[in-house]
Amino acid sequence: MSAELLLEIRNLKTYFFTYRGVVKAVDDVSFTVGRGEAVGLVGESGCGKSTTAYSIIGLVPPPGRIVGGQILFDGMDLTKFSDSELRRRIRWKRIAMVFQGAMNAFNPVRTIGDQIVEAATYHLNITKAEALDKARQLLELVGLDPNLIHRYPHELSGGMKQRAFIAMALVCRPDLLIADEPTTALDVVVQAQIINLIKRLQQELKMSLILITHDVALTSEIVDRVVVMYAGKIAEQGPSDILFTKPQHPYTQGLISSIPRLHNPEKITWIPGFPPDLVNPPKGCRFHPRCPHTMPICREKEPPEIELGPNHYVYCWLHARR
Ligand SMILES: Nc1ncnc2c1ncn2[C@@H]1O[C@H](COP(=O)(O)OP(=O)(O)O)[C@@H](O)[C@H]1O
Ligand code: SF4
Ligand SMILES: [Mg+2]
């Protein structure tokens, strides 16, 4: 568990400056990823997961920008890097990202092989023949027939295209792979295959992984640690075995109890209500309008960070009172 740190996000704030006001999409978020560690970043849609990921690779779309905090990657603060430095030294080379619908990012009129070769020759100092070799090896690594290099994207199924995109993301053997909802839009069987593939690659290549999903059930088998976000903030973070069996934040408890179980599939409870507007989030604890345990202080003051055990932190007044 005491893995050497690869990534340390400290008090990250990323806001979108819209005509409606300032959207506080990521608001004082801190977490770490160790070398070779798999971390799940989970929470309902709109809680700031993708914005966190785009902040790490320096691709926050306008009108958004990082307004505070540090992103320490292998000792370097990426928030201080220019875009060209990030492009030359970090993105794709050391941190690669597979995003939602990545499979549709392939150019439809060029073969899969051409596109992997282009990525390889752009980022690595290798010849076209070497790159072609590499493309074949990578396709094999992700469980595809190397001869698919001659095929066009439309000749592959959704799951195969997603595998091919993952192959392309691994061209430089990155230290960190960020997979943002990598299985959305795929059917359930293929989802499980892709998740298992990501886990296998992470272990074989000894990569660090941030797996982002709104579907906590997907992460349970494959991550070492879970970071739960709610409305731009972290609600709870801790080792996955503890979070899945003994969640301590009322929001995590709601998320976990909504996972259908084999034994009592009818006992699905979900947290009523909707996440707040991040232009004007609720005062105090952002979860208070939906929480079944709200106390007067929750409406007034932001909950502090409470350490419950090794690497286990919760941000909730219920625990501060103990
Ligand atoms: N390009 C953008 N412009 C304005 N607001 C945005 C933009 N992208 C995301 N947001 C807002 O930031 C918040 C977090 O979004 P996002 O990081 O995409 O959440 P998630 O990935 O958890 O679904 C949401 O309120 C969303 O509406
Ligand atoms: S701080 Fe209060 S409102 Fe927020 S989760 Fe804890 S008990 Fe609920
Ligand atoms: Mg997202």
Image (cartoon, rainbow, N blue to C red):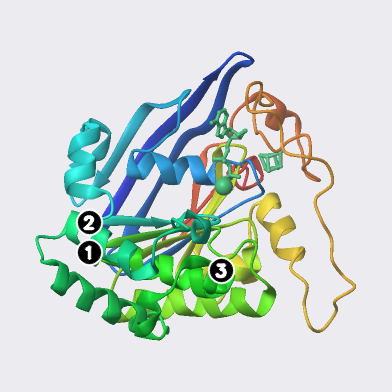
Q: Position of residue 134 (x, y in %)?
A: 22, 75
Callout 1 amino acid: Cys
Question: Which residue is tagged 2?
Answer: 93
**Circle 3 or circle 2, nearest the eye:** 2
**Quarter of the rendering containing residue 95:** bottom left
Checking the image for residue 65, the label placed there is none
Q: Position of residue 114 (x, y in %)?
A: 31, 65
* Sequence-first tag of 2 and 1: 2
Q: Is residue 132 above or below residue 216?
A: below
Whole-number angstrom distance, CA of label 2 to CA of label 1: 5 Å
From the viewer's perspective, is 256 left or right of 23? right
Residue labelled 2 has its Cβ within 8 Å of some atom of ligand 3: no
**Quarter of the rendering containing residue 112:** bottom left
From the viewer's perspective, is 117 left or right of 260? left
What residue do we see at 51% from left, 45% from top? 50
* Sequence-first tag of 3 and 2: 2
Residue labelled 3 has its Cβ within 8 Å of some atom of ligand 1: no
Q: Position of residue 239 (x, y in %)?
A: 48, 66
Q: Marks 1 and 2: in contact by CB < 8 Å?
A: yes
Question: Which residue is tagged 1?
Answer: 172
Q: Is residue 67 visible?
A: yes
Q: Is residue 271 above or below residue 188?
A: above
Q: Is residue 315 visible?
A: no
From the viewer's perspective, is 21 left or right of 6? right
Callout 2 amino acid: Lys
* Sequence-first tag of 3 and 1: 1
Question: Which residue is tagged 3?
Answer: 219
